[in-house]
Amino acid sequence: GGVLAFFLSVPMRALERRLAHFQEKHGKKVRTRFNSTISLLITYIGSFFIIFMVFYILVPQLIETIPPIVTSVENALPRFYTFLENHNIDSSQIKSLLSGIDLGVLIQTVVDNYEQIINTSLSAVSSVVEIVMLAISGFVISIYILANKTKLQRQIRKVLYAYVNKRYADRIAAVASLTNKTFSSFLSGQCVESLILGCMFFVTMSIMKLPFASVISVFIAFTAMIPYVGAFLGGAVGALLIVTASPMQAVVFLITFMVLQQLEEQLVYPRVVGSSVGLSPIWILVSIFVGGKLFGIMGMLFFIPLTSVVYSLPRTN
């Protein structure tokens, strides 16, 4: 809930500033509580709408590609066997493996082990229910945090200064403020970078008349929120979609993807995200490589703003 609230606080604060500026511009009293409530509603509704639209557009397209892919694989197997034989490669083991898949035997195995399958299924359902309940709890907690963020900040500050020496409390407050500002700027820059990358793919694919331009562009923009790695997931899904229409166009898409991805990695990402967190492009790349090596995807996501905070701390002394 706290992590979700932190992520959503970025667009929420931006909306609050916009509403306050609008009220001041028209000579009206700034209604802080009203602005906070409206911004909270718009943030959650907008976030769920974006996620829903991504899955609403993408999932049906992926489901439709499954039968053509299966058919393509079945038609390609004889050519694959011929290719192996022409290059003096023994394909008997592959043929034996594929021919050994008997639907009747599979069904009988399911029948013989139905009790274990039911128990496993119930365990999986139980795990899903537990995850859903945790997600709902986190969602409710995030709403409470954002709806009362000003009050919570004031309470935390009071507790800090009540139990910690003022000198250290001032330092902790300064570091917390810098961290919050840096992470918020990073998230904003990451969103801008994802939007730019999605637009680059949509324009390029439309010019080259590649299929599924809008769907693939939206998915790549969505997954690009994960630095550097996320876009490759979008590229893999895009190639999977296009190969059902034309294998040659899928090859063209992969080449186009690699070119645009390199442009984005070397030019767009370091400049957009680097300027938002105050780091040079070389430090952006180092942060991603080190964070990914140590902590995987989450390390790649958080090491950039963390490096910016460490880099900025000496200047705040």
Image (cartoon, helix red, strand yellow):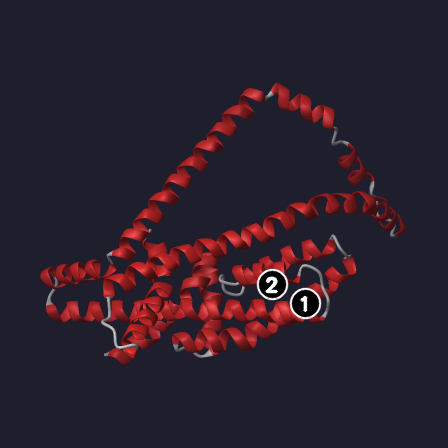
Number of the label disc, if any, that sits on residue 217: 2
Based on the displayed image, in which of its 4 quarters is residue 207 positioned?
Answer: bottom right
Based on the displayed image, in which of its 4 quarters is residue 67 positioned?
Answer: top right
- Mark 1 surroundings within 10 Å by alpha-carbon count, few (fewer than 14), some (14 through 19), many (20 or more): many
Quadrant holding the C terminus: bottom left
> Is there CB contact under 8 Å for labels 2 and 1?
yes
Q: Secondary structure at mark 2?
A: helix
Q: Is residue 81 left or right of residue 172?
A: right
Amino acid type of the residue that numbered disc 1 sits on in the rendered structure: Met
Q: CA distance from mark 2 to mark 1?
A: 9 Å
Pick whichever of labels 2 and 1 is earlier in the sequence.
1
- Residue 29's spot in the image, x, y percent? 22, 71
Give the vertical position of 196 relative to 137 (above or below).
below
| Towards the viewer: 221 or 259 | 221
- Residue 52's spot in the image, x, y percent? 50, 51
Give the vertical position of 140 relative to 97 (above or below).
below
Residue at x 38%, y 59% (from the top left corner): 42
Residue at x 30%, y 78% (from the top left corner): 25
Amino acid type of the residue that numbered disc 2 sits on in the rendered structure: Ser
- Residue 16's spot in the image, x, y percent? 31, 67
Q: Secondary structure at mark 1?
A: helix
- Residue 99's spot in the image, x, y percent? 79, 33
* Residue ID for mark 1: 205
